[in-house]
Image (cartoon, rainbow, N blue to C red):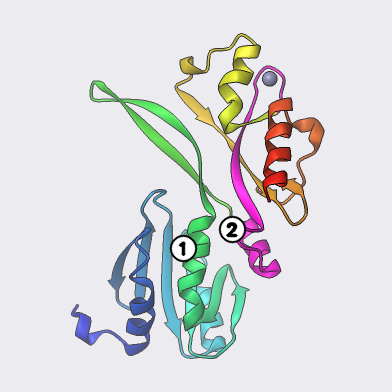
Amino acid sequence: MRYEELDKRLKIVYSRIRYLDDYHWEIQDDEIKGVHKKSGMKVVVTTAGDEKEAEEKARKMTDSDAIKIIAVGDRGVFSIKHGSFIMTYRYVNSTLSDINDHIVWRGFKVNEEDGKLVQEDLYEYLGDRLIEHIKKGEIAGQDYVFWQFYRCEHCGRYVDLDDVETHLRGHGIKSYDNSVEEYEVFEINFKDRKIYNRFGSEVREGELSEEALEFIRESFEQQ
Ligand SMILES: [Zn+2]
């Protein structure tokens, strides 16, 4: 395959997304394949002549485990059909940035490998929240932030990442003994002044530790 021989539409889309260095890009046939570097999450970007052709393409792509984007030349298109994003060329770039914002660190695991200990980082793609944010036009950092919360094994309440050590110490648990920590990623939404879990359900005050409540109160005040 030679770059010069690529389909013009594919080249146009590629030329707009190749600056996004959160992804590693490869082009094969009529698809631009991306791997989100930190998480290993896959994305596939392809093109179609118009919306109708894009829908047909989306129907055939349902078995792929990647996040699928089909770019069309028509103006003002943005929809989700058969699990694929169908959109105007010029929205692809910002959607990939939005996807990057919605892939969030959710903990670590220390693995034994060839006589050494290797930390594996865990990530989560908050696809449901992404769709909600697009619908409402909410912007990361301005309208909401994601934060990691640890469900305390002793009292069952969620503690914000920065206060885990102190909180566990209060129960006599030493966090430095943990070789695995998995967090729940919650959304602190400044517009609604509410906390949502990954599915968009509200996290109630009673589920949060004292430290977490204080942390959230401070976050709201700073806005
Ligand atoms: Zn606790």
- What residue range appears in magenta? 128-157
Q: Quadrant of residue 169?
A: top right
Please tell me which residue is depicted at 31% across the width and 87% down the height of the picture: 7
Q: Is residue 108 above or below residue 165?
A: below
Query: Can residue 5 be seen?
Result: yes
Where does the image place residue 36, in percent across and percent down from the top left? 39, 56
Find disc 1 in the rendering and name its residue.
64
Q: Is residue 140 magenta?
A: yes
Which residue reaches farthest front?
Answer: 222
- Relative to 182, is 40 above or below? below
CB of mark 1 near ligand 1 (< 8 Å): no
Q: Position of residue 74 (x, y in %)?
A: 53, 91
Q: Residue at image x 60%, y 26%?
A: 163
| Number of residue marks | 2
Residue ID for mark 2: 140
Task: Tell me where residue 205 sits by quadrant.
Answer: top right
Query: Which image quarter: residue 142?
Result: bottom right
Q: Are the residues tagged 1 and 2 within 8 Å (C-beta)?
A: no
Q: Specify the amino acid type for callout 2.
A: Ala
Circle 1 — which element?
loop
Is-magenta flag for residue 139? yes
* Residue at (59% x, 55% y) in the render: 141
- Find residue 49 and name its label: none
Question: In the figure, is residue 220 to the left or right of 20?
Answer: right
Ligand 1 contact, mark 2 (Cβ < 8 Å): no
Identify whether 79 is placed above or below 216: below
- Element marked by disc 2: loop
| Residue situated furthest left in the rendering | 2
Report the Cα–Cα distance between label 1 and label 2: 28 Å
Q: Report whether residue 61 is seen.
A: no
Question: Amino acid under label 1?
Answer: Ser
For marks 1 and 2, give the one nearer the viewer. Answer: 2
